[in-house]
Image: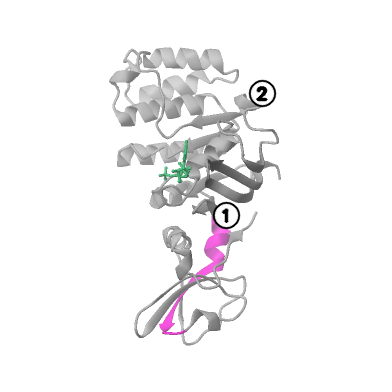
């Protein structure tokens, strides 16, 4: 299957500080990829490297088989909606759509018009007079109407109300199905990602801690709860992702491909949010912590 984004030992440093390091991932096309991690983990940095707004300090990155931002054809294939959803304050919505049509060879005027109408926005209204959420919706409309092969969205729903968030996430799912669109979006709202993402990347402290298909990740991670014990004494094929203890009880999140035979433990499945939180747990508290990257 073709890759939408491949990175090999990718790193980005600002001065002495690494914003992203040793990032090796290979994301197949056709997925909605959620990128999560704490503030400052390197999510925007990775997205900007993929969009061609930043140059790597080390390693390589390929997007849809080409170097990000290197040619007009490459730029046409990738839509990018930045975190601050930049729009031109003095331009009306209609002017934004006309500009989009002029700048993008694959522009879909119907999608753009219909989406603006559905949102109840007046095309004559200047972008500078829109609310933050409305500006975000305009920027997202421009991104979708460009009809890219890959749409990169940096925290697209942060400023949307719950109804608009749901509408947007549903729209994304439909667009991926109808137009063979791949999406990479960052968000802190894992409950929203859970509804649309079928691939997940967790970044912590500038490094990829976990990447893979959501169904496989959920099938291979388990929560073990039982009498307090040392996680080092678990079977070798159970990689400990996080461990928490009270005086008498231990709760351990493990990754394993094998069935778990542990009569003393209660074994339960994790939600995506539990899984993300387990990987975001402080590394110092993780015994035999695993970095899990799968295609
Ligand atoms: N232009 C810059 N100059 C210097 N340091 C930067 C710059 N941009 C980002 N950084 C640093 O790089 C690290 C990663 O930042 P990045 O914006 O990629 O994180 P993030 O995961 O997107 O965070 P958030 O969730 O808060 O948006 C942070 O430590 C940040 O301070």
| Location of residue 115 with respect to 295 vertically, above or below | above
Q: Is residue 143 left or right of residue 52?
A: left
Give residue 35's position: percent from left, percent from top.
Answer: 50, 47
* Residue of label 2: 73
Q: Is residue 188 left or right of residue 70?
A: left
Q: Which residues are magenta?
A: 212-229
Cβ of mark 1 under 8 Å from ligand 1: the answer is no
Is residue 269 in sight in this rendering?
Answer: no
Kindly identify the residue that appears in the image at 41 percent across and 79 percent down: 250
Q: Is residue 7 left or right of residue 120?
A: right
Q: Nearer the viewer, residue 20 or 295?
A: 20
Kindly identify the residue that appears in the image at 47 percent across and 68 percent down: 284
Bin the neighbour count of mark 1 within 10 Å (Cα to Cα): few under 14, some 14-19, many 20 and up.
Answer: many
Kindly identify the residue that appears in the image at 62 percent across and 70 percent down: 257
Callouts 1 and 2 close, C-beta under 8 Å: no
How is the rendered protein coloured? one colour
In the rendered image, residue 215 lying in the magenta stretch gets the answer yes
* Nearer-N-terminus badge (1/2): 2
Residue 138, disc: none
Q: Nearer the viewer, residue 214 or 139?
A: 139
* Residue of label 1: 211
């Amino acid at each position: 299957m073709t890759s939408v984004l491949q990175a090999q030992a990718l790193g980005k440093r600002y001065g002495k500080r690494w914003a992203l390091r040793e990032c090796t991932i290979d994301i197949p096309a056709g997925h909605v990829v959620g990128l999560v991690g704490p503030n400052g983990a390197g999510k925007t940095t990775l997205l900007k490297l993929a969009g061609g707004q930043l140059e790597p300090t080390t390693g390589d990155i390929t997007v849809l088989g080409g170097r990000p931002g290197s040619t007009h054809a490459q730029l046409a294939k990738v839509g990018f909606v930045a975190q601050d959803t930049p729009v031109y304050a003095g331009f009306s919505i209609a002017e934004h759509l006309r500009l989009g049509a002029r700048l993008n060879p694959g522009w879909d005027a119907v999608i753009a018009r219909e989406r603006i109408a559905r949102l109840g926005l007046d095309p004559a209204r200047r972008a500078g007079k829109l609310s933050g959420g409305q500006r975000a919706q305009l920027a997202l409309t421009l991104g979708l109407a460009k009809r890219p092969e890959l749409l990169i969205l940096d925290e697209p729903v942060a400023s949307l109300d719950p109804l608009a968030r749901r509408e947007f996430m549903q729209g994304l799912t439909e667009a991926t199905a109808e137009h063979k669109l791949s999406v990479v979006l960052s968000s802190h709202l894992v409950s929203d990602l859970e509804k649309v993402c079928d691939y997940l990347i967790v970044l912590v402290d500038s490094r990829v801690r976990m990447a893979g298909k959501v169904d496989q990740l959920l099938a291979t991670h388990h929560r073990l709860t039982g009498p307090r014990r040392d996680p080092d004494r678990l079977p070798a094929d159970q990689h400990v992702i996080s461990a928490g203890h009270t005086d008498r009880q231990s709760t351990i999140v493990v990754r394993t491909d094998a069935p778990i035979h542990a009569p003393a433990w209660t074994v339960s499945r994790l939600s995506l949010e539990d899984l993300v939180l387990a990987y975001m747990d402080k590394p110092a508290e993780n015994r035999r912590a695993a970095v899990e990257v799968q295609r």
